[in-house]
Image: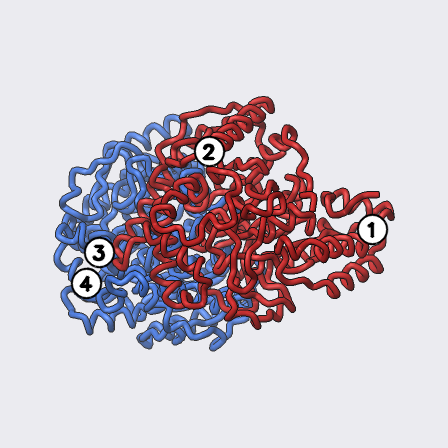
Chain colours: A blue, B red
């Protein structure tokens, strides 16, 4: 019999369609696995067991063996920072522990309308600002593939849940690698769509996001196959009138394999040899799939990570921490101060404005190169999943060294681009609105990579 | 015989198609009128007479009576700030007087590819920051309908050229009313598309725009009919790979007449009675066309003009003037200091960041109302065209009073929306990506308004 905890969406739906499993059995099996092992992993931080079992029963009663939507019967993990009716939304802060939400936000509503069964909320670090998942409210999330290692962050709970077989798909958000980094560290796929693809609308509160959120942050799925990424992305993407930064743009036709640039040292990233070998491997397999993969065709992007850290760091340190800093867990606040403190532009607005102008110039330099090479392959992190305490009170110098290993991550955000992290720590990045090209290359790469199994627990 | 200087695009093309006029005759007649009267108006500041006559001859030779593109044979005015091969691009500054451009920028290229005949560059105020058109390099542009009055700004040269019968269509840009205000003052139509519609790509230089440019500034046409606005907009709109803020979104289907909200006092604007009567008139004629027009259904937007002036003012005063201020004509620099000085958030970045967050909250409040009323009619300026010196060295208090009369202008920019200025000083505003709805209402209003004649000179 199919083991639903390691199955893909189509395998689950095939089992439902043939009568091999009911939706309730799919959900119950996941809840059993969570019950047995989540205590050690801490991927889920809130469960809605009774509710989701009732929803599965209702769907079984209503639809039986008929698959009633693209996500019908599929168990989901949703990052804490997304509002799910009846669950609290905390940003990881103890001060928000009673902030129960009345209503699903748009992305969650779209998932439900497609038949998704939402198991609960996944862990995050405080404020979702960290490549680790440690929160004052929920504690530490570990990597299911090696419990001495971080799951990554900030969508570390989702990545752990997908890698552990607690959920088929997770929903995260990526302002600076928060989908791609945990996906890489946990050995699953993670997709950050380009800016404007996944509309945000949350009826629970008035939005007060700064402009960098609109330009650099996007919601996307984590899963164990590119097909599951694609199916989920197709459900959650799309314009909404209340998010005017979301765009009603159609998908581009998927191209025939074209030219791919390798981003290796152009950002100044410090890369472990194992990561460089993975990059070489992805170059080889895309070449085998008919892509023309070329090195040293991209411009100097060494300023891009700095400019990203200037913009985000200034917002965190000058606008955000003064209000919320005393509510953030100490290791999180200190991490922000140590790392972003090295880059933020200070209190003077003119330096911050100059960073945005430099962003535009850098973006144009890259886009000129991408006219010839519309896809880029690059590392995500410069190293495999580090130990759990890799970013705890390490001081300014080590924090800058940490960013140096992560320099291939934030240019994708700075320039509003879509990027697909592969389970081996490499990402495929395309131009804005070219999600289909990115996913097509992802399918091509996946054919040469091992199937993503769940971690043995 | 048709007088081409007062004709619409279709009238010009009909005359070419029937053999009543050649393209050369169309252009020559415009150049004669410019020769005779531009000295008094100062709408055009650079002409390419020989080149455009040669282009007209070439098109006559190549196409004869066949109309070879949507703008074939149509004489255009293009704002100085857009690069036209062989013309200088100055931003109105004497220091840029030798800055001749090698290449057309994208919008100009799209015009040419559609058959447009570009007569020359139109006047602007220094830096394009003023609702008046006075520059250190080019002097003052006057209103062809009353030479004691301003043509408005910053696309005042285009508006004057279209109103004077010097050009059929003008191309301007609108960051804070720079298309809509001069169109209103000169009694022509002016259309600001929503953010992301008209891609910007200028091969002559690396872009270094701040983020507010991407969110709030858009290129659009000024013309004497809504049809000519629509034809030109259809040519210049569209995504380009080098402008990732431009979006490959299709147009919405044009709606049946729907619900329209009247914006009258919600921004705190001070309105002359004649402007309120024009607003009443547009409400009446849209009602006659089947729209349901309602007052007092919009939220308080009194903070929107302030937030716009905070963001733009801070960028001007903290980032722009320190570099370029000593090259700007005195009345322009002082105007910026007096008016925006009252709003800019100072040197501290946190106040500037707070303005962006307030923008997002205000935008959401408006969009919630626009779910019920997807179109808004509002004044542009609070008064008809004022005297030429209305913004010269008037001091802080009068500058704030001036902004108070213009408070219905910049919310359209702040929220990235499309807006069509009518010749009577009223604008029709829609949601982002709803340009077709705005233009449909514009056609409806136009049926009840006098045909826009050229000014007798």
- Mark earlier in primary sequence (1, 2): 1
Question: Mark 1 and mark 4 in contact (Cβ < 8 Å)?
Answer: no
Chain of the residue that carries numbered disc 4 in the rendered image: A
The subunit carrying tag 2 is B
* Left or right of residue B221: residue A351: left
Q: CA distance from mark 4 to mark 3?
A: 17 Å
Q: Say which residue label 3 marks.
A: A133
Q: Where does label 1 land, which residue?
A: B66
Image quarter hosting the N terminus of chain B: top right
What's the CA distance linking mark 1 and mark 2?
A: 48 Å
Q: Chain of mark 1?
A: B
Label 4's element?
helix
Residue B309 % position (x, y): 37, 49
* Observer-nearest of A358 and A140: A358
A69 or A437: nearer the viewer? A437
Residue density around tag 3, few if under 14, some if 14–19, many if 20 or more, within 10 Å: many
Residue A337's disc number: 4
Which residue is disc 2 drawn over? B272
Q: Residue at x 30, y 61 (%)?
A: A349
State if disc 2 and disc 3 touch (CB < 8 Å). no
Q: Position of residue B439 (x, y in %)?
A: 59, 37
Mark 3 → mark 2, Cα distance in angstroms: 59 Å
């Amino acid at each position: 019999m199919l083991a639903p905890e390691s199955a893909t969406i189509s395998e689950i739906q095939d089992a439902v369609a043939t009568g091999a499993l009911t939706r309730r059995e799919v959900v119950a099996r996941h809840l059993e696995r969570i019950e047995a092992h989540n205590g050690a992993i801490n991927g889920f931080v809130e469960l809605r067991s009774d509710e989701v079992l009732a929803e599965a029963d209702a769907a079984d009663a209503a639809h039986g063996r008929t698959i009633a939507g693209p996500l019908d019967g599929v168990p989901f993990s949703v990052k804490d920072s997304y509002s799910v009716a009846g669950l609290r939304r905390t940003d990881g802060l103890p001060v928000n522990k009673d902030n129960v939400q009345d209503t699903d936000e748009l992305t969650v509503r779209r998932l439900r309308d497609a038949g998704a069964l939402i198991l609960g909320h996944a862990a995050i670090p405080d404020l979702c600002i960290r490549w680790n998942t440690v929160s004052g409210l929920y504690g530490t999330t570990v990597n299911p593939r090696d419990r001495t290692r971080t799951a990554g962050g900030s969508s570390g709970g989702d990545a752990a849940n997908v890698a552990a077989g607690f959920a088929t798909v997770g929903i995260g958000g990526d302002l600076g690698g928060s989908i791609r980094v945990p996906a890489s560290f946990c050995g699953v796929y993670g997709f950050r769509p380009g800016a404007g693809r996944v509309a945000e609308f949350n009826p629970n509160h008035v939005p007060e996001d700064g402009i960098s959120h609109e330009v650099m942050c996007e919601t996307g799925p984590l899963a164990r196959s590119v097909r599951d990424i694609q199916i989920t992305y197709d459900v959650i993407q799309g314009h909404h009138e209340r998010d005017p930064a979301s765009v009603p743009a159609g998908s581009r036709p998927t191209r025939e394999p074209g030219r791919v640039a390798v981003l290796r040292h152009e950002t100044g990233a410090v890369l472990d040899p194992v990561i460089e070998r993975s990059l070489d491997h992805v170059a080889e397999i895309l070449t085998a799939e008919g892509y023309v993969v070329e090195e040293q065709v991209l411009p100097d992007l060494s300023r891009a990570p700095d400019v990203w850290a200037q913009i985000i760091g200034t917002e965190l340190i000058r606008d955000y921490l003064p209000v919320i800093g005393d509510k953030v867990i100490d290791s999180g606040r200190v991490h922000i101060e140590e790392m972003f403190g090295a880059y933020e532009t200070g209190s003077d607005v003119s330096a911050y404005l100059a960073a945005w102008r430099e962003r535009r110039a850098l973006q144009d330099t890259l886009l000129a190169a991408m006219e010839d090479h519309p896809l880029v392959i690059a590392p995500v992190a410069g190293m495999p999943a580090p130990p759990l305490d890799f970013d705890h009170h390490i001081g300014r110098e080590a924090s800058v060294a940490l960013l140096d290993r992560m320099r291939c991550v934030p240019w994708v955000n700075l320039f509003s681009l879509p990027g697909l992290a592969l389970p081996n720590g490499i990402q495929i990045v395309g131009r804005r609105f070219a999600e289909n090209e990115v996913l097509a290359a992802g399918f091509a790469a996946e054919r040469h990579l091992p199937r993503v199994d769940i971690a043995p627990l």
